[in-house]
Image (cartoon, rainbow, N blue to C red):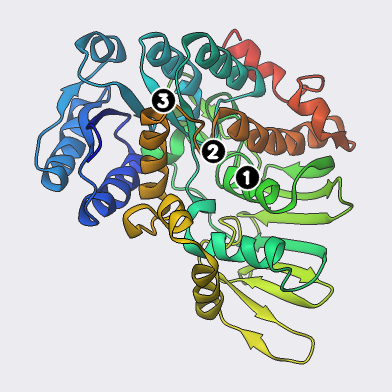
Amino acid sequence: MSKRLNVALVGCGWISSAHVNNGLRELVQHGCNDIVYSAVCDVSEEAAKKRAGEIAAIQGCEPRIFTDVETLVHSGVAEAADICLPHFLHHTVAIALLEGGLHVMLEKPLGITIKASRRIIDTVKKQKRVLATGENIRRYLGARACEWALNTKHLIGDISAVHVQVINYSPFDLQNSAFKWRVVKNLVGGGMIMDSGAHFTDMMLYLFGDVDDVFCTMSTHDRRMVNAPIVGNVPADVEDAWHAVIRFKSGLCVTWTYSRAYCGEKRSFGDYHGTEGTMMDAGFPFHCFQGGGQVIFPDGKTLSKDQLQIDYLLSLADGDKQRLFPYGCANGFAIELWDFADAIRNNRKPDIDGEEGLRAKALCEACYESATIGKAVKYDDVLNGRINAYQKPIDDFWKL
């Protein structure tokens, strides 16, 4: 058994429930008892107490409760932190924890802008700590199996085109505190391009490699007033509709379309067309292949997602199975937590580190930058900060 790793859960809102009730719970149920949430921290003591109770019921011991990061750092009760906070707090809290000597796993997207993200990464290098991006989607069995089928087995030949679309009418509930900050650009960094879109962009890079350029148009239809934290009563100003064309250095083009503002029948699909067949996403297409994928061949034959996953598992050596699905866990939140802990223990790079998180974020930002200046942008120019028309007002707001 490895030495117990004491982790502080920083932020006890909505996404932290998945980290605890999906991630920690599955690890414990599968026999992993060397990762312990020793502390919880939230400005809302009520929220912290609620999450602490859930943690205690899972791991058998109660975490200490904190309402500010400085006191948590000085307490010495944790050597690592799992940050589950709104985007605008990512860089300030992550840097404070890193400078306090803690290793950090930070929920996606890494920072609110490229500049904020680079400040986090610079602090990691200076403090010689481990930084992991909390990206769960690519770790699911369905996503791993489909990546293997596309890139290792070449099951549908060479990829010719990818079309992903979600169109529906689903305005956010602005009375729900989880959405109040999500519709204000200075708090969230962007709308769904940045939010669920961070999962999508990570998977695009994971599946298809380096991006050449991006062209995007976007619009905001829902401009209701919202009483948001920090900024007060302001109009919603993030995009709620977009169309993007992402061109990879391989020549592959991905089209990515979304709206939550268009009335009518919901349309949702993720189609991956190859020279020898098509793979269709079986789940929410922005969480690419989390629910697996079905293959359709030109002769009409199909390969189910279940058979595809069986074939993939049979292809893995025992060591790879343990690394990719530790203790037999299949939940992405469990796997990311285990990988973070294992990287700390073995002084290695986590599977998805800060640099990978930054690259996924930069693809989101490339969409924003293109839509802002009205023309295609080179991905590398956005990644390296040479184009930042969309991000500059956010950087100025946070004095970055």
What residue does disc 2 label? 352
Q: Which mark is residue 104?
A: 3
Which percent across, then down, holds residue 64?
14, 25
> What separation in Å lies between label 3 and label 2 (alpha carbons)?
12 Å
Helix, strand or loop at label 2? It is: loop
Q: Residue at x 50, y 43 (%)?
A: 135
Q: Amino acid at mark 2?
A: Ile
Q: Residues within 10 Å of mark 1 (few under 14, many from 20)?
A: many
> What separation in Å lies between label 1 and label 3 (alpha carbons)?
19 Å
Q: Is residue 56 above or below residue 160?
A: above
Which percent across, then down, holds residue 19?
33, 43
Quadrant where the N terminus lies?
top left
User: In the picture provided, is 119 more to the left or to the right than 297?
Assistant: left
Which percent across, then down, holds residue 319?
44, 54
Q: Amino acid at mark 3?
A: Val
What residue does disc 1 label? 202
Q: Residue at x 15, y 43 (%)?
A: 59
Closer to the camera, 2 or 396?
2
State yes or no: discs 1 and 2 in contact (Cβ < 8 Å): yes
